[in-house]
Image (tube, helix red, strand yellow):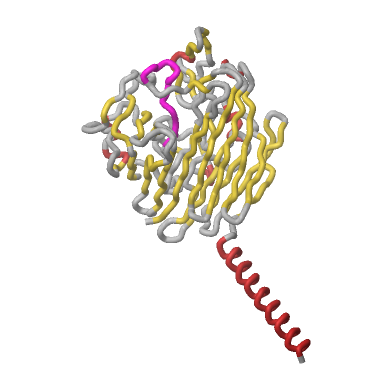
Amino acid sequence: MKNKWLSLMILSLALTLFACQGNRVKENNKTGNLSMMKEPFGKADRKDVFLFTLKNDHGITVKITNYGGIITSILMKDNKGQTSDIVLGFDSLAPYLGTVPYFGAIVGRYANRIAKGMFSLEGKKYQLAMNNGNNSLHGGLKGFDKVVWDASEIQDTSQVGLVLNYLSKDGEEGYPGNLKVTVTYLLNNRDEFSTKIEAITDQPSPVNLTNHSYFNLTGAERDVLDHKLTIKANSFTPVNSELIPTGKILPVSGTPMDFTSPEMIGSRIARVEGGYDHNFVLNHKAGSEDLAAVIEEPLSGRIVEIYTTQPGIQFYSGNFLDGTITGKGHKVYQKHFGLCLETQHFPDSPNQPSFPGTILKPGEKFMETTRYKFSIR
């Protein structure tokens, strides 16, 4: 009898443990349906290029290629349940290989502009390629947006992502030092997509790295002038006719640069010569990850919140889009069909002693994060 009862107790305990394990499996399946897919995307510089698709439980889908670290697509539902692509770009690799305005790419070694492509460092003058009129822009003729990065995948029950690595060699595009760069893209089930950028060097070098995605929360059905924008910045850096900072930092209050409360982009753009292409000085302390900007598209209800550790954010209203580029789904990108909010250090900082420093030295690490939170009103 004792053996019978002992057998029944063991069986009952086994069934209980099996049921508990089954419940845990069901819970993980319910919250852990994050997925990652890798597929061939072509070749560049005789290297294989891949497209990585990250997807969470709520249908947020982010596509990234290791060519240029480019975010080619972000799919998001609207308030009617319809899914659209909210960033500009192309369906295939070939157009990215041409001259395009940095759609979705990692830009560097120095994002934004350096006046006359020149800077001095430790008593030595450096000349960079002048690829934007008289200035150097986003790293030069072949910046980080035009190279093939080494890629490895991340996947667990809480997030999926991609780690990209690139070694920018001493003298590349005129910059000193071997710079090792790591970009980590992560998507989770809280509808957050984050970018962490790290870099180390063996010689002092100016470093300013960011992602250059163009957002259009209508799915590029029309321009972005009716998007509402908030930027958590009480001041900005005014520019000259070549979009180089004057070195001053001015208050946004009373100017068309005031986005401290939600403002429709098109409401005052006519008062800004050429449109918005300005760096805003964020209110938070550099290094703390705080809310920097919010984009909202009223009809679709789509909202993107941007959090960052970076000290500045460049708001660009797609002024140079002119209808000559046909993007995904055969959509023609007209003027103001995309907006950029590039979390960054300030433009031309190597030549502006009053701006936060951007010289990375051996033994130091460049490390900045930006997080995008997607929601629907």
* Residue depicted at x 50% and y 33%: 210
Q: Nearer the viewer, residue 83 or 185?
A: 185
Assign the C terminus to one quadrant of the image: bottom left
Q: Residue furthest front?
A: 2
x and y percentages locating residue 156 in the rendered image: 62, 53
Assign the N terminus to one quadrant of the image: bottom right
Quadrant of the rendered image containing residue 202: top right
Let me know if residue 346 is in the magenta part.
yes
Quadrant of the rendered image containing residue 16: bottom right
Using residue 29 as the reference point, say whether residue 322 is left or right of it: left
x and y percentages locating residue 132 in the rendered image: 47, 20
Using residue 189 as the reference point, say whether residue 8 is left or right of it: right
Quadrant of the rendered image containing residue 236: top left
Q: Nearer the viewer, residue 6 or 190?
A: 6
Query: Which segment did they paint magenta?
Result: 340-354
Task: Give the vertical position of 139 relative to 256 (above or below).
Answer: above
x and y percentages locating residue 149 in the rendered image: 64, 33
**Is residue 93 in view from this perspective?**
no
* Residue depicted at x 57% and y 54%: 158
x and y percentages locating residue 205 in the rendered image: 54, 19
Let me know if residue 245 is in the magenta part.
no
